[in-house]
Image (cartoon, helix red, strand yellow):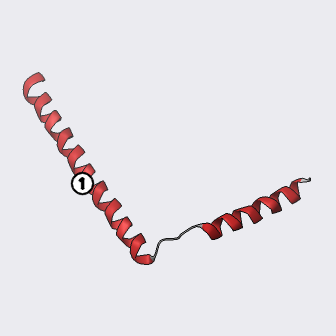
Amino acid sequence: MNIIKKIITFLKDVRLELKKVTWPTKQEATKHTITVIAVSIIAAAFLGGIDFLFNYLIDKFII
């Protein structure tokens, strides 16, 4: 099999597999996007708070 036939076969297989995918609706994608953003903001706030606390403790007691 030459390289062109392999590429064509690969692309046909990709197309068949993509037809099997269950794509989310617009509402589901929006809901999941908002959830990811909210969790990211919460994690950033938590880690930022921990960083601020450790910096404060280091400045207060060590330096």
> Dot 1, how many residues are within 10 Å of its Cα: few (below 14), some (14-19), or many (20+)?
few
Q: Residue at x 87, y 58 (%)?
A: 4
Question: Dot 1 corresponds to which residue?
Answer: 42
In the image, taking residue 22 as reference, residue 53 lies left or right, namely left
The x, y position of residue 3, in whole percent, is 87, 54
Depth check: give the residue in front, 50 or 58.
50
Task: Find residue 7 and report its image quarter.
Answer: bottom right
Mark 1 residue element: helix
**Is 36 placed left or right of 19 in the picture?**
left
Q: Splitting the image into 4 quarters, where does residue 39 fall?
A: bottom left
Say which residue appears at 8% left-offset and 25% top-offset. Answer: 61
Q: Residue furthest top?
A: 62
Residue nearest the observer in this picture, 54 or 2: 2
Q: How many marks?
A: 1
Image quarter where the C terminus lies is: top left
Name of the residue lying farthest toward the right: 1
Residue lying at the far left of the rendered structure = 60
Amino acid type of the residue tagged 1 in the rendering: Ile
Image location (x, y in percent) of residue 32? 37, 66
The quarter of the picture where residue 37 lies is: bottom left
The one of 2 and 49 positioned closer to us in this rendering: 2
Residue 38 rendering spot, x and y as whole percentages: 28, 61
Q: Kindly identify the residue that appears in the image at 17 percent across and 40 percent down.
A: 52
| Residue 11 image position (x, y, % from top left) | 75, 63
Q: Is residue 5 left or right of residue 21?
A: right
